[in-house]
Image (cartoon, rainbow, N blue to C red):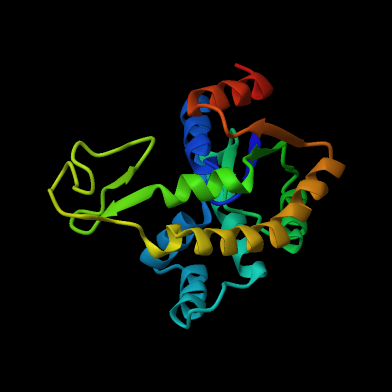
Amino acid sequence: MKIIMLGAPGAGKGTQAKKIAAKYSIPHISTGDIFRANIKNGTELGKKAKTYMDQGLLVPDELVVDLVVDRVNQEDCANGYVLDGFPRTIPQAEALDKALASLGQKVDYAINVEVPDENIVNRMSGRRACVGCGATYHLVYAPTKVEGICDTCGKELILRDDDKPETVKKRLGVYHDQTQPLIDYYTKQDILVEVDGTIDINDVFAAIVKILGE
């Protein structure tokens, strides 16, 4: 099973991708992990990616696709994989389809974890991070024993800049501009499935398993 996860930042697609990977014994592949592994191992693709990243530039689509295809060609992907955070744009999706077709492969499911923007803003603005050990909490879903104090190391908790409502709204705007077209793209291919991401994490996963099968 070759699966792509779609969903806005904070929709919980990463959590579901990990659960899918564990249940079906297939690798959970995030582009961030691929970049880090290639850079760490000093591969040619990694060196190319690093030159862009060091300048604070986005890694070009062709290079990202090369890195992803290189990863899905590895032995542990023989029975499938879950792609998380890629593709983000139509050109990336088209390049991925083309590259997979040349290997005699195709994407089986694009799973969209659907959560309204206002829920995401509330979710993310409720997150708190420890200034000491980096542990993360949530005011509603995972509160600390003592308000504003880390359970682990006793240091204070802060609202990170990227979790502030105005930043989250900006990120959601970028997401809708770039990624919304992917929903139409995969709908046309008849592989898009949608799950309600507002319900309990385990219920979201149960809905996904119903789609993918035991």
In the image, is 173 to the left or to the right of 75?
right
Residue at the location (62% across, 23% down)?
207
Q: Where is residue 145 in the image (x, y as percent from the top left)?
A: 20, 36
**Residue at the extreme top of the image, as rendered:** 214
**Residue at the extreme bottom of the image, as rendered:** 55
Front residue of 34 and 158: 158
With respect to residue 91, does 107 lie above or below? above
**Residue at the extreme left of the image, as rendered:** 154
Residue at the location (55% across, 40% down)?
77
Residue at the location (73% across, 55% down)?
93
Can residue 41 be seen in the rendering of this structure?
no
Q: Position of residue 102 (x, y in %)?
A: 76, 52
With respect to residue 100, does 203 lie above or below? above
Front residue of 109 and 134: 134
Q: Position of residue 128 (x, y in %)?
A: 33, 51
With respect to residue 58, does 207 lie above or below? above
Can residue 44 be seen in the rendering of this structure?
yes
Locate the C terminus by quadrant: top right
Rendered image quadrant of residue 179: bottom right
Residue at the location (44% across, 57% down)?
163
Q: Position of residue 141 (x, y in %)?
A: 38, 35
Locate the N terminus by quadrant: top right
**Residue at the extreme right of the image, as rendered:** 188
Rendered image quadrant of residue 158: bottom left
How many numbered discs sit on the rendered protein?
0
